[in-house]
Amino acid sequence: MRETDKHRSGIIRAYESLFPRCGKYLEIGIYNGGSLEWARDFYGCEVYGIDITLPDPIEGVTMVELDQADTEGLVRFGEEYGPFDLIIDDGSHVGSLTLNTFEALHRFARYYVIEDWGAGYLHPDFEDLHIAVLRLVWDHGGYLVNLGQSGFAVIGTEPLEELLRR
Ligand SMILES: C[S@@+](CC[C@H](N)C(=O)[O-])C[C@H]1O[C@@H](n2cnc3c(N)ncnc32)[C@H](O)[C@@H]1O
């Protein structure tokens, strides 16, 4: 089993309790593929990943080499493989790229999650990611899940209502 820091941060426990029925899963930011293996085994269904560099193939997982800056490529990807129950952006964490990816892909998502949005507070390289994400939550509806030093934003009013009904 490949490693993922999602275990350490507590994000996996949060996902498993918030999204117990996720069927089709896309993650932007694969790294070594540990989180895709977890998604495949936990959800037992279709798992997709996007990254600028791909690790060795993972059985049952579709991985595509794609840059978060490539708007047309992202839209083509969504049209070819979407829609998804859950899209997670755990890629560059750069504000402009996070916004670009959201604009291209959120129409293909039931739940759209942006991980580690608080990184925007840490370094100018992230281009005020936190401001961008708070703006998305404000404009589209959604909420923030706080997990100590990490956390994520869930965007979209429909998913929010659905989760609260559970
Ligand atoms: C934090 S790691 C992902 C960790 C993985 N999601 C996990 O939970 O185990 C971030 C990944 O984002 C990718 N990345 C960085 N900039 C990117 C870009 N512009 N487009 C696509 N992927 C990018 C990196 O190559 C890296 O693999």
Image (cartoon, rainbow, N blue to C red):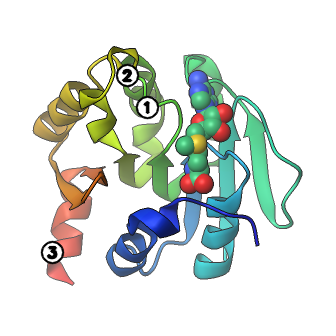
Q: Where's residue 32, x and y in %?
A: 73, 51
73 relative to 147, above or below: above
Q: Residues within 10 Å of mark 2 (few under 14, many from 20)?
A: many
> Is any atom of residue 28 visible in this view?
no
Circle nearer the N terminus (2, 1): 1
Mark 2 touching mark 1, by CB under 8 A? yes
Q: Is mark 1 within 8 Å of ligand 1?
A: yes
- Describe the element under mark 2 as helix, strand or loop: helix
Residue 147 in sight here: yes
For the point 77% across and 60% down, which residue is it?
61
Q: Is mark 2 within 8 Å of ligand 1?
A: no
- Dot 1: few (<14), some (14–19), or many (≥20) neighbours within 10 Å? many
Residue at coordinates 45% horizontally, 21% vertically from top-left? 97
Going by the numbered disc 3, the residue's amino acid type is Leu
Q: Nearer the viewer, residue 131 or 68?
A: 131
Q: Is residue 56 above or below residue 64?
A: below
Q: Residues within 10 Å of mark 3 (few under 14, many from 20)?
A: few
**Quarter where residue 107 is shown:** top left
Q: Which residue in the structure is indicated by mark 1?
A: 93
Between label 3 and label 1, give the one nearer the viewer.
1
Q: Which mark is residue 164?
A: 3
